[in-house]
């Protein structure tokens, strides 16, 4: 049985019925596109993901890349799948025509690539990192850097990495110790170790473009402490000659592979820069070139961080989504047990989807997976608005909302779509715990997401410590306006459709109001330790509120479609919209109320964790 | 760094300061024991678990048992560890002296074996299944069966299994299709397939004793439908001669090994009975002997079910506990970042345990792990009371409380100690996601626990559908009495210690009262489908309430010790009790309030899952 990777019907609903992505094609930047070209891009991705990536997902898990001391070996089928991907021009799908790209709206590009996340998250990570790298160079690199590195990456001939963490500095970038020493010719020589570098070494492409955070020592050879001293460098594995051909091996070597619980399709590496294994130009030190200006490295990197975090959130949602679909297929085809009121053992067993508890699990998984996908597509739509909004005000508004929602779109699916993954195993029973069913791998793959691209705790501090206060709290005001707009629509329609959604809308407003008050209270304490002590809980409360609002939005959209369609609606369409309403009901009735005790706890300014002492553990 | 497996200090607190396990030695059955012999048993287990089991835990994960088509191969170090275990007489620790056992109180035996669960849950599963098997035969087998099978098992020469599930009948035992055909000599011949059989084949012991559920056909060869037709059989892998030596290979063969996400130390098998690969006595069919009476098989099996479920709950708590201790060690030794109010990058990094969010994660993990362990030891104490209570009333009371709490002691740690396992990974950051740290394996091992020995959903139906109504609801009344007794103690002491615990006690009582009312309401609906639709949520609500009460009990015990000790208390002891109070605070302030929205949802008799249709997914 071949389970679906994602739901094309749901993507159409989200992109077109809800987010009106086609409207973007009326903007100058996307004017070459139409609903047809957008659909064709999604169709292509769905097909390639199904035919070339999903079938190798388990193989990449069992045949982890290995290092024989000299080189890394990746499974051949991965190389083939990635070649199909790049041959189809997908590496450049989101890039401008001038770079050979398709210039797709970001919203649609994300929807396209959700298929690869869902089909094979590890293998798909190579192109995603490469695109992020290329984006960063386009934004901050020189023309020469763009010509030298971006083009080969977009052609899929080279892949890229992001080298931030070090063994002694994971979340704490201010402690980066990699040194970049200025050379007379304007280049730099880098010395240091980088940890957790995905794709840091591989045997798939002939070159690897590393983007590396490092510090330039002052005249006394000292590194400026803190994040302010950080600069960004492009450091290719193989040096590039003026004609674009490959030259000497740079002084970057693999120190070892990390062996992960899941997400094994891509190597994860410890890299040594400048240890002298190779001596380009007869001298130790990895040769690199400054991107942007000195001491602006973190700003450059953070320029891409929102999009990288949407990427992680989208991957998390896709993993939850495909697990949900696998569980759904299983539940529809596995006979077991009988209904509570008809336990006659002489009757045949029923498919387990008939059991209320199995439906509860599937409905929960659906609400998390579809909620997570919708949230991330909404944020992707904000990226498009930020890029191409019709006026400065619209662009600024989108920018601020995106700043506020980024920690949520990264962390919420990482947490709740893991719950979807767990429920997908539970629906399978014992079979789900075996490696014969994909849900087992999805669960392991997913567990990375609350860790990379800023841990859950880091997202909480970002949200409560920074994002809710941007421009004097304008971010929260904008969010309040969005929620109010949605709820006004529920009230407007309450007259002719009962007040189910109006009541839900009131609950969303009430929760939002209380959470705003708590954020304000926490920031008047005058004690940053107490303000931030439960930042993770604030993140989780706010996340659930945001997704409740996203579900209310979807419900209104589905309800309107049902009313428009009336009795003439095709039964499949009627079922689709009814499912949306039921999932929205589930989330608003069962999930949203969970926020209440979180707010109570935050409002009490609880210090149980803060005052806990090391010796008491 | 060698992390602790469990906390000996906490075990002493739970066993002696809280549950007064030594008092059991004043009972006739345990009169040979004293605090010293109980401590010695725990010390022995702690030592053997640390020296022989913990060191091979990762090995058993990476070198999974394999089947070469002829036989199964297990790692040699496992065989050695199990030999140390049985040579120390531990297989019989909980058995009576007349069987060569130590006749330990059940509470202490469970505490002893928690060390093996925590050190190496997969490998330890062989003896645990064997003990359960031996217990069942002692309770229901004939003297000859006891002599033939139990003694070799308690000597560790043979291991045992429990064969319930079949490929088409996992949770639904009424659909068991294995046939047991009566033979003229009083034996039976069995034909059928058994799935998910842990330890069903191995190369560790010379024989394997299978306990098998099967149905005896009537004169027309039909199997009685439903659970009533089920009988229990003992079916050895190798037939046993009258002198106890091994005879012919029985007609039981391994059809295949299941390959699991974790818990890999023990084989999990599909077994074929009676397919004729071996033909004992020249005839196909696995030779078995009836245990107890025909059609009483499920009753026999369920006799042991409470203890098996405490076993799973204890294993889950132990996995959460050891993961918590590993994370604690890591957090105390990993410098990273700086406090919110002292971010000067020129200062050294602090150990991550200094971060409030890390302390929050550790405190949560502590409250789940210690809460789960305490809950299961409390239930084990009920088993002792059920066995050796001073009068019929005390025994009956313990029995009913145990019936009520069994679904909770199995399911609560399976759910919440997985959360502890996840937090332990999160505390490790990227390292926790690699296979270099044990927390990664604990997380995978744990995921089995909500599935085996009755899934989470099955436990919910057992609790709400059956247990809360036993003897007209006497079970809930008894629980109410226990809670009231605890809370009365908080009120009694409120005068001289502020009213922190009295307030917590009121919250526990209030939650209990509401939950009782909801149970009653659900049972007056007159519609079993609606009554049971959200049984899993009822289970989770009740479980959290029970553990809140267990934490209140621990807090009172710790508070009393602090007051008794006064200023003369050793600082380590002061720290230990302070930690207990802080964990209790965490649970009562942060976890207990989560039950509120669950009760609201149950009280609304929500039918969102029940009315969801297949076509709407």
Image (cartoon, coloured by chain):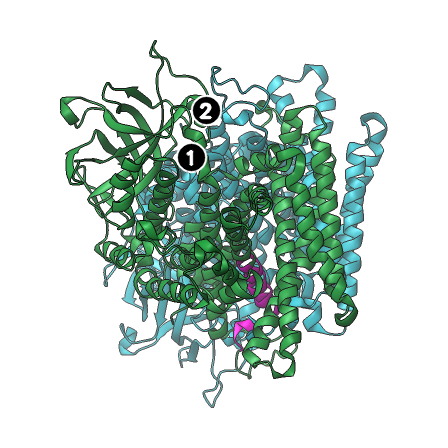
Chain colours: A green, B cyan
Please, which residue is most extreme toward the right here? Answer: B495
Q: Give the residue at x 50% y 66%.
A: A12
Q: Position of residue A150 (x, y in %)?
A: 29, 43
Q: Which residue is mark 2?
A: A227
Answer above or below: position of A73 versus A424: above
> Magenta stretch: residue A354 in it?
yes
Q: Which contiguous range is marked in magenta?
A: A350-370
Viewer-nearest residue: A557 or A605: A557
Q: Which mark is residue A301?
A: 1
All told, the count of numbered labels is 2
Residue B65 seen: no
Chain that bears disc 2: A
Q: CA distance from mark 2 to mark 1?
A: 12 Å
- B275 w.r.t. B346: above or below: below
Q: Relative to A26, is B569 on the left or the right? A: right
Mark 1 — on which chain does it sit?
A
Query: What is the x, y in percent for residue B373?
Result: 58, 42
The disc, 2 or 1, on the residue closer to the chain's N-terminal end is 2
In the picture, the disc for residue B537 is: none
Q: What main secondary structure does the magenta stretch of the protein show?
A: helix
Residue under the image location 68 percent in, 66 percent down: B465
């Amino acid at each position: 049985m071949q389970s679906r990777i994602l739901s094309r019907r749901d993507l159409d609903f989200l992109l077109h019925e809800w987010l009106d992505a086609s409207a973007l094609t009326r903007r100058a930047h996307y004017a070459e596109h139409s609903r047809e070209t957008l659909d064709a891009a999604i169709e292509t991705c769905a097909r390639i993901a199904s035919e070339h990536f999903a079938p190798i997902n388990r193989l990449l898990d069992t045949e982890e890349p290995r290092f024989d001391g000299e080189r890394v070996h990746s499974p051949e089928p991965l190389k083939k799948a990635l070649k199909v991907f790049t041959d189809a021009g997908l590496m450049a799908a989101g890039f401008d025509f001038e770079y050979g790209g398709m210039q797709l709206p970001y919203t649609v590009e994300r929807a396209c690539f959700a298929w690869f996340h869902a089909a094979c998250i590890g293998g798909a990570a190579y192109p995603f990192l490469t695109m992020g790298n290329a984006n960063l160079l386009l934004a901050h690199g020189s023309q020469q850097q763009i010509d030298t590195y971006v083009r080969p990456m977009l052609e899929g001939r080279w892949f890229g990495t992001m080298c931030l963490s070090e063994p002694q500095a994971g979340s704490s970038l201010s402690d980066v110790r990699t040194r970049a020493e200025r050379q007379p010719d304007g280049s730099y020589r880098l010395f240091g170790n980088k940890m957790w570098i995905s794709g840091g070494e591989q045997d798939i492409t002939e070159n690897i473009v590393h983007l590396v955070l490092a510090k330039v020592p002052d005249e006394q050879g000292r590194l400026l402490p803190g994040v302010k001293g950080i600069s960004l460098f492009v450091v290719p594995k193989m040096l590039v000659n003026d004609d674009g051909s490959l030259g000497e091996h740079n002084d970057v070597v693999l120190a070892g592979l990390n062996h992960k619980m899941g997400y094994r399709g891509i190597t994860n590496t410890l890299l040594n820069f400048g240890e002298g294994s190779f001596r380009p130009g007869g001298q130790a030190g990895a040769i690199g070139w400054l991107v942007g200006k000195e001491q602006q490295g973190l700003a450059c990197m953070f320029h891409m961080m929102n999009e990288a975090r949407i990427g992680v959130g989208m991957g998390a949602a896709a993993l939850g989504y495909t697990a949900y679909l696998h569980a759904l297929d299983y539940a529809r085809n596995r006979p077991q047990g009988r209904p509570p009121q008809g336990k006659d053992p002489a009757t045949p067993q029923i498919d387990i989807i008939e059991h209320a508890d199995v439906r509860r699990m599937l409905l929960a998984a659906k609400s998390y997976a579809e909620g997570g996908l919708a949230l991330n597509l909404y944020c992707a739509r904000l990226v498009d608005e930020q890029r191409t909004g019709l006026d400065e005000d619209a662009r600024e508004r989108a920018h601020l909302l995106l700043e506020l929602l980024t920690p949520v779109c990264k962390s919420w699916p990482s947490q709740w779509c893991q719950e979807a993954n767990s429920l997908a195993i539970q629906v399978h029973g014992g079979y789900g715990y075996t490696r014969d069913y994909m849900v087992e791998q999805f669960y392991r793959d997913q567990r990375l997401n609350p860790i990379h691209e800023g841990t859950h705790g880091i997202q909480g501090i970002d949200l409560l410590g920074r994002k809710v206060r941007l421009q004097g709290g304008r971010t929260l005001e904008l969010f309040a306006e969005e929620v109010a707009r949605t709820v006004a629509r529920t009230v407007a329609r309450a007259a002719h459709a009962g007040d189910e959604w109006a009541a839900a809308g009131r609950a969303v407003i009430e929760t939002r109001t209380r959470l705003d008050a708590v954020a304000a209270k926490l920031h008047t304490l005058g004690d940053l330790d107490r303000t931030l002590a439960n930042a993770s809980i604030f993140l989780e409360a706010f996340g659930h509120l945001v997704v409740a609002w996203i579900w209310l939005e979807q419900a209104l959209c589905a309800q309107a479609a049902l009313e428009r369609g009336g009795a003439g609606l095709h039964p499949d369409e009627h079922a689709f919209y009814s499912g949306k309403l039921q999932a929205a009901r589930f989330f608003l009735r069962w999930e949203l109320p969970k926020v209440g005790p979180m707010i109570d706890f935050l409002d009490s300014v609880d210090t149980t964790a803060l005052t806990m002492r090391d010796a008491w553990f």
